[in-house]
Amino acid sequence: MERRELESRGYLVTPGFVDLHAHLREPGFEDSETIASGARAALRGGFTTICAMPNTEPAIDSPGLVTEVVKRGAAAAAARVLPIASITRGRAGRELADLIELSAAGAVAFSDDGSPVDDSQLFRHAMEYARTKDLLIIEHAQDLAMSGKGVMHEGVVSARLGLPGIPSAAEETAITRDLAIAEMTGARLHLTHVSTSGAIASIRDAKARGVRVTCDVTPHHLAMTEEWVGGSREFAWERREPAAPMKTATPYDSSTKVNPPLRAWSDVRALWEGLADGTVDAIATDHAPHASVKKDVEFDQAAFGISGLETALSLVLGGIAAGWGDRDTVIRALTTGPAGILGITVRDDDWIAIDPDMEWTVTADALASMGKNTPLMGRNLRGRVVYAVVGGEARYEGGLRGATPVGSR
Amino acid sequence: MRWSRRHVLDTDDWSTEEIEAVLDTTGAMIEVLSRPVRRAPPLRGRTVVLFFAEASTRTRVSFELAARTLSADVVNISASGSSVEKGESLFDTVRTLQALGGDIVVMRHSSSGAPYFVSERTDAAVINAGDGWHAHPTQGLLDAYTLRGALGDLAKKRIVIVGDVVHSRVARSDINTLVPLGATITLSGPPTLMPSAWRCGQAPAGTTYEPDLDRALEGADAVIALRLQKERQEGGLLPSLREYTRVWGLSEARVARMRPGAPVMHPGPMNEGVEIDASVAHGARSLVERQVTNGVAVRMALLYLLVGTPNLEAS
C-alpha cells in the first residue's frame, strides 16, 4: 500500500520510530521475551528499528554474540534489531569489553544498562576509548549506594506506603559525575531514561556549555507518577486539584515497579519541558518484559520493568491531546532524534501509519510482547499503529479500515 | 453503622465512623474477657489461619487468644519450619491457604503490601497483622482504644510519637487511627529515621515533625516510643545507641515535661535502656501492659465484625 493512499484515507503517516532502548531478553531469558517476539511487539508499537540492550545471559560482550543478535533480528523479519554491546566484560563493571571489535561486528552503542558503570575511573576509560572511534556510550545513571534497596521513588508516596525509596538525588549525583567525565574526555554521552527535574536541569546546563550529551525519556515517565504505586491510575495530565491520593487499583501492584522509578508530578512536567526546549533528544521505551513469575510476587521482591513497546504511542498521544507537548516535537523524538544519536539515516522505506483516534484495550492477548507486565493492563487507550513498512515491505497491518491483514501475528 | 469491609489491610482510608465502630465493639469484647468463663460462641465453626511469615510471638499469641475466645478453630502457619523459609513463593503459600479453606487469614509479613497481594488471591478475609514498614492496623486501633481509656475524647489531644518512624508500621497506623479521632501528632526522632518527605513540608495531615524531643514533649498529652532496631547503627543511620538514648530516649525527667500524669506507651518489645528507661517503662505513667490486654479485645472486635456480628451470647 502506498503512503499517499493511507494519508488520503486520514491516517497519520510518519517515518518508522526508532527505539534506543529495549530489552529483548534473548539469550538467557526467553521465558520473558525473544528477539522475534520483541521485534514483532516493536512493529505494533510503530518502531521499525529497535536497539537491543545487552543485559542478557550471557551479556552481549563478544563479537560473536553481536553477530548472533543481528542474525536473529533479521530472521524475525519484523522491526530492524540493532545490537548494543556491554561497556564492561560480562557487565561486571571491572574491565572494558572489546569496544572497537564489538563496534566492527555491528554494535551500534555500548551500555551496561540495568546498572551504571559504578567505577568512575573505569567509566572515564570507557569514554576515552569511545572518543577515538566516536562510539556511543549509553549510561544508566544511578548512584547504587544511594538507591540501595529502594523499590520506588523516595517521596510522599513511599513514606505513606512504607517502601524504601530511590531518591531523585541517586540519579542526579550520577548524572553530575557522568557529565563531568563527558566534559573531561570530550566523548559523546547518551543518558538514558532520565526521570527527574534536577537531571533535566543539569543536562540543559551541560548542553549550553557545549558538552556532547544527549538524553532520552520513557513514555511511562512522561505519563505516570509515583502515585501509581499507591493505586492511582491517573495520568499526570489528568491530575485534579487538590491532589488527593486516589486508589483506583490495588496498591503495591508490581507492574508499577520500574527503575528509574515513577517520579513525582513535578518531575513529569519537567520531562515534557525538556522535550519542548530540546534538552530531551529522544523518547525511548526501556521496554522491559518479564515472565509473570518475576512479577507475581511481593512488591519488594518483584523485578523492575514495564513492558512498553506497544503502549508508548498511546501514552505520548495522551500527553499531546492534553496539551503537554506538540505532535511534531514528539514525532521527532521518536524518529530523527534517536536516529541522529545513533548516526543512522531515517529511511524513506521504513514508515508507519497511525490511527490517532482508534480506541483499544490493553489485554494480554492484544500485546505481541511476551511481557504482559504493564500497569495499563485492562485500560482503554487511544491511538494505534495500523500499518508498518520496513525496507519497503509491509510487515504489520492491524485494524486498517477495509483491508486484509498482512503479517498480523 | 453497618460494617462493610471484607479485609483489614490498612486503616488509611477508614472513616472515623469505622474506627469508632471497632472501638465500641472492643468495649463489648473487654466485657467478654472479664467473664468468669472467657469464651463466647460467635466464631464457632469458623477457621482462622494465622500466617506469620515473620517472627512474632506477641501479636500471634494475641490473635490466637482472640480467635479462641470467640470459639474459632485456629491453624498456625509460622515462619520457622514452614515452607516460607524454604523459599516457597508467597503465591504458592496463598494457594495453600486457599486450599485449607480458612475463613479469615491473619498475616504478618516482612514485605510492605503483602496483605494486598494475598487478599487479591484468596476468598478468605485478610487481616494485616503487620506488613514491612507499612501498617499494623490492630496496633493503631489498640493504641487508640488505650489512649481513649486514659484521656477520654482524643479531640485536641496532642500525642508524641518518638523514634524510628521511617521503618515503623506502628507509627503509620497510629497516625491513620489517631488523627481521624481528632488528635494531633508530633513526630520526633533522628532525621535519618524520619521519612524525608515528612521532614520537608509534606508530613501527613494532623502531624508535624519536631526533632527536639524535649520541645515535642512540652505539654503533650501522651507519648508513644517506638522500638529501635539495633541494626540501624550498622546501617549508618545513627552514630551510636548511647547518643540516641541521650537525645531521644524517654527518661523520667523527659516525660515529666508532658502534662501531669500524661501516659507513656510502647508497642513492645521494649529495649529498656535504649528508647525507654526501665523506670519509665514500668512506672506509674506506663500503659504498656494495658496495651497488651486491649490488644486481645481489639483483635476479637475485628474478627467479630468481619464474620458479620453474630450473637455474642451462647444459644
Image: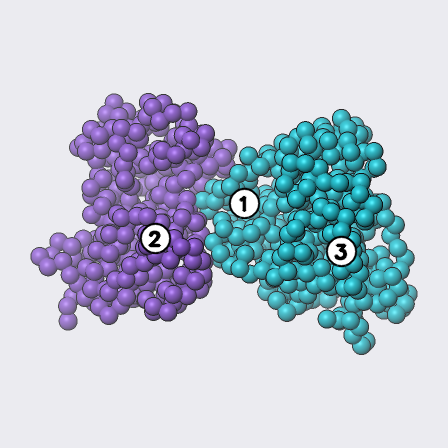
Chain colours: A cyan, B purple
Mark 1 crowd level (few <14, some 14–19, many ≥20, 10 Å Cα): many
Residue A68, labelled with which disc? 3
Residue type, label 2: Ala
- Picture coordinates of residue B125, whole percent (x, y): 36, 63
| Quadrant containing the C terminus of chain A in the rendered view | bottom right
Label 2 residue SS: loop
Residue at left 34%, top 69%?
A: B101
- Picture coordinates of residue B210, whole percent (x, y): 40, 29
Residue B79, labelled with which disc? 2
- Picture coordinates of residue A402, whole percent (x, y): 80, 76
Residue type, label 3: Glu
For the residues labelled 2 and 1, the Cα–Cα distance comes to 27 Å
For the residues labelled 3 and 1, the Cα–Cα distance comes to 35 Å
In this rendering, the answer to whether A349 lies above or below B266 is: below
Mark 2 crowd level (few <14, some 14–19, many ≥20, 10 Å Cα): some
Q: Quadrant of residue A201?
A: top right
Disc 1: which residue: A152
